[in-house]
Amino acid sequence: MLELRRLRLLAEFARRGSIAATAAALGYTPSAVSQQLATLEREARVPLLDRTARSAELTDAGRRLAERAEQILTLVEAAEAELSAQSDTPTGRVVVTSFPTAAVAFAPALAHSLADHPGLTFVLRQTRPGDGIRQVQSGEVDIALIDDWTGKMADQAPAALEFFHLRRDPLVLALPARHPLSNPECPVDLQALREEPWMAAPQGEPSRQAVELLLDAVGGARPVPWEFEGLHTILSLVARGLGITAIPALALAAGDQGIAVRSLPDPSLAREVYAVTRAASIRRPSVAVTLRALYSAAQDVRPSSPRDAAPRDAGAREGGARDAAAQRG
């Protein structure tokens, strides 16, 4: 009989592509993963991995069983969620992973809201861009907070995942408080700012790509930004009068002093913030109440408003996280 824990290892190996990566993701040693997969092969009575001295890859039978393992694990989680849904009291451990600015911005409201559920153990972790969805799929976390600059991620989501829209987060111009453009009556002329010392995240970061799109639109050779790791580091330098930046508004939730915020000429430069979870998890009271708390926290955050900001679009898409409990049936 095939053992569920070993099927999970096989499914994870299919996602990661190596024994070392599978071990690192699930907290095992590579030797333990290799031994468990060898045991699964004996149980299945067919070779599942084609091993060489330096690598291993799935055989055809291994790929088919990995696909079935994903289906089995989803059904097991759905069954557990149905049993958990019999109780209206959120209990147990919920693990949420988040990109850094959302973790900082949402944490106070989350802590306040979830304090009403003493049986719930809440864990909030920060993760690297791109890891959140993978961690939800693998079962490492229950919910991931992700940012999407493309506007396409929710439409391209795997069927096993649910995306809940939390808020739209526009790119804004952050200037030292005494900068001439801090005056809201002065129009924002990016061309006139080209010679300013621009600061941005390192190459490859989504916010850096948004800054480059912004500067490309001005035309001509783009100024080379100073690179700093961490948006809050950049804001601290702007507050000291050392440069300017374009940054997602959510990064300003901590209320940095000494910074003026202006709207940008192109309002389309923005990211969408989502909570992502496995569809089978939504019926769990602990996950449902956490989704509602995340939606509420996202609405309660009040980043420093641009001095010339337009009223929020009432027709903007809102997240379904506030209604997640209704899906428990």
Image: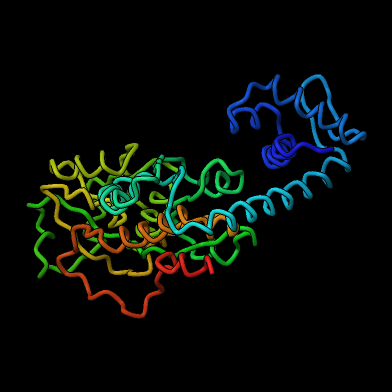
Q: Position of residue 21 (x, y in %)?
A: 64, 31
Tell me: 236 left or right of 94. left
Q: Is residue 148 visible?
A: no
From the viewer's side, name the closer residue of 159 and 123: 123
From the viewer's side, name the closer residue of 282 and 63: 282
Q: Position of residue 284 (x, y in %)?
A: 51, 55
For the view shown, which residue lies furthest in the bottom direction?
A: 315
| Figure label count | 0
Which residue lies at the image location 64% right of the left edge and 21% below the top edge? 29
Tell me: 6 left or right of 86. right
Q: How is the image coloured?
A: rainbow
For the view shown, which residue lies furthest in the right direction?
A: 45
Tell me: 32 left or right of 121. right
Which residue lies at the image location 47% right of the left edge and 70% below the top edge? 326
Quarter holding the C terminus? bottom right
Q: Is residue 81 visible?
A: yes
Q: Within the image, what quadrant is residue 314 found in? A: bottom left
Quarter holding the N terminus? top right
> Is 77 drawn above or below residue 1 in the view shown?
below
